Amino acid sequence: MGETNRAPETVTRVTSSVYPPSLSAPQHPLLAGRLSRVCLLILLTGTALADEASIRIKDGAGKDKVLANCISCHSIDYIPMNSVFLDRSGWTATVNKMVKAFGAPIKDEDIPQIVDYLSRYYGKG
Ligand code: HEC
């Protein structure tokens, strides 16, 4: 503990205080690998949840209807992800499919506003 003013050895000491020397040498890298993978997983999950909580789709008429109707089953990311493929008729078909095939409980009168929003802000060029 007397060598604190020598930088390289400080680093070594920090490492060995995390993985105590009592562990046998071959366990160190394995243990470190598993731990960091678990940490990474927790970090990624946390990020995904945070993104979902602060849902980012463009502001505009109909956004509230989309948020109210399109996030209960899957990520809102489905919308920007599919914006390269779907034009107005594609979005109409997709919204109808959500209702008819997947049972999305969307009110008939909300559908035109949702389709307007999707094709205006996320319609294929
Ligand atoms: C009742 C549940 C449900 C609701 C509500 C819902 N969806 Fe879906 N959606 C699904 C399922 C199931 C799939 C297909 C499986 C998958 O990819 O997860 C899907 C897939 C999609 C896809 C991928 C492309 C495709 O056709 O499969 C898009 C885009 C999409 N939904 C948009 C929407 C929009 C926009 C809304 C709101 C109007 C919405 N969804 C509401 C269940 C739902």
Image (cartoon, helix red, strand yellow):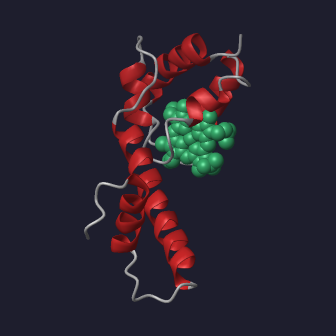
Residue that appears at 39% across and 73% down? 16
Q: Is residue 25 left or right of residue 84?
A: left
Q: Is residue 36 visible?
A: yes
Q: Nearer the viewer, residue 96 or 80?
A: 80
Residue 122 occupies quadrant: top right
Q: Nearer the viewer, residue 105 or 3?
A: 3
Give the x, y percent position of residue 113: 47, 17
Residue 106 occupies quadrant: top left
Give the x, y percent position of residue 92: 63, 24
- On screen, residue 88 above or below 104: above
Residue that appears at 39% across and 25% down? 65
Q: Nearer the viewer, residue 97 or 71?
A: 71
Give the x, y percent position of residue 27: 53, 84
- Give the residue furthest to the left: 2
Q: Nearer the viewer, residue 107 or 46?
A: 46
Quarter, ligand 1? top right
Q: Is residue 51 left or right of residue 121?
A: left
Residue that appears at 41% across and 38% down? 51
Q: Quadrant of the C terminus?
A: top right
- On screen, residue 87 above or below 33: above
Residue 4 occupies quadrant: bottom left
Give the x, y percent position of residue 78: 58, 36
Q: Is residue 96 visible?
A: no
- On screen, residue 34 above or below 41: below
Residue that appears at 39% across and 89% down? 22
Q: How many marks?
A: 0
Q: Quadrant of the N terminus?
A: bottom left
